[in-house]
Image (cartoon, rainbow, N blue to C red):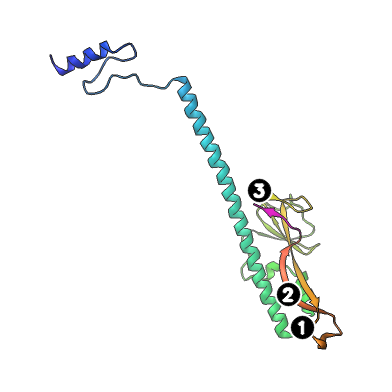
């Protein structure tokens, strides 16, 4: 009796779920998904895709936050240089003009996502993911593109307003008794506290 005949005999004996063998080397098993197996596989794929999509949105938002922080850090560095020039020249009266100036003017190269100067802009009037300078309040504003993990300040809007804050302290030098306040620093900081996880 040949090997082909022996394999065929096994297939007939083993039960109804087995198909007739087409080859003497391949096991005679039924192939295909049941409906329940197919539903389980589809459910697992949908859950994994949902998790991947959620994480990708989170990382997009973290990348946006990092880019915004990088621009604000560059502006703070440029502000420190401007302040140093004022101190070197001995013209502390120029600090008031520095507070009113557009911080983007201090950068050697403006970011690609800078829209320009607007008078009293709203979040809907500026494209999301862009910087804009408010000519009314003299604030530099960043309008968020991804704000799923952002908790806004008191105004409740999905943007961050920055301004130049001048820090003074009581003068400790006797030569400055005519002016009791001493300029101790100048910062580029948010107008309102916010949290962005």
Disc 1 crowd rating (10 Å Cα; few below 14, some 14-19, many 20+) is: few
Q: Is residue 2 above or below residue 155?
A: above
For marks 1 and 3, the one nearer the N-term is 1
Tell me where residue 169 appears, x and y as whole percent. 79, 76
Instruction: Name the spot of residue 81 as percent of width and height, x first.
Output: 66, 76
Residue 89 location, quadrant: bottom right
Looking at this rendering, what residue extends furthest in the left direction?
Answer: 1
* Foreground of the two, 50 or 110: 50
Label 1 SS: loop
Q: Is residue 102 left or right of residue 57?
A: right
Q: Which of the two labelled residues, at mark 1 and mark 2, occupies the earlier sequence position?
A: 1
**What is the C-alpha distance between the residues marked 1 and 3?**
43 Å
Check contact, mark 3 vs mark 2: CB within 8 A.
no
| 96 in magenta | no
Look at mark 3 in the image and give the residue it sits on.
Answer: 149
| Distance (Cα) linking label 1 and label 2 | 15 Å
Residue under the image location 76 percent in, 69 percent down: 165
Identify the magenta region: 192-197
Q: Please, which residue is most extreme toward the front here?
A: 172
Estimate the x, y position of residue 183 in percent, counting from the top left: 77, 78
Real-space Cα separation, disc 3 to disc 2, in angstroms: 32 Å
Upstream in sequence: badge 3 or badge 2: 3
Look at mark 2 in the image and give the residue it sits on.
185
Mark 3 residue crowding within 10 angstroms, few (<14) / some (14–19) / many (20+): few
Mark toward the viewer: 1 or 2: 2
Question: Looking at the rendered structure, which numbered label has been put on residue 91?
Answer: 1
For the N terminus, give its image quadrant: top left
Side of 114 where 37 appears, left or right: left
């Amino acid at each position: 009796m040949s090997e082909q005949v022996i394999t065929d005999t096994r297939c007939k004996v083993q039960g109804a779920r087995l198909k007739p063998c087409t080859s003497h080397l391949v096991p005679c098993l039924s192939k295909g998904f049941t409906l329940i197996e197919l539903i389980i596989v589809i459910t697992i794929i949908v859950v994994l895709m949902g998790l991947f999509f959620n994480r990708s949105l989170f990382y997009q938002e973290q990348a946006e936050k990092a880019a915004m922080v990088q621009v604000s850090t560059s502006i703070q560095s440029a502000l420190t240089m401007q302040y140093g020039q004022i101190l070197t020249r001995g013209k502390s009266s120029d600090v008031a003009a520095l507070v009113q100036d557009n911080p983007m003017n201090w950068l050697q190269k403006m970011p690609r996502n800078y829209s320009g100067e607007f008078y009293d802009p709203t979040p809907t009037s500026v494209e999301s993911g862009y910087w804009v300078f408010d000519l009314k309040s003299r604030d530099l504003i960043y309008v968020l593109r991804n704000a799923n993990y952002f908790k806004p300040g008191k105004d409740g809007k999905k943007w961050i307003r920055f301004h130049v804050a001048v820090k003074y302290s009581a003068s400790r030098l006797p030569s400055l008794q005519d002016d009791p306040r001493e300029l101790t620093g100048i910062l580029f900081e948010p107008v309102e506290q916010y949290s962005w996880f």
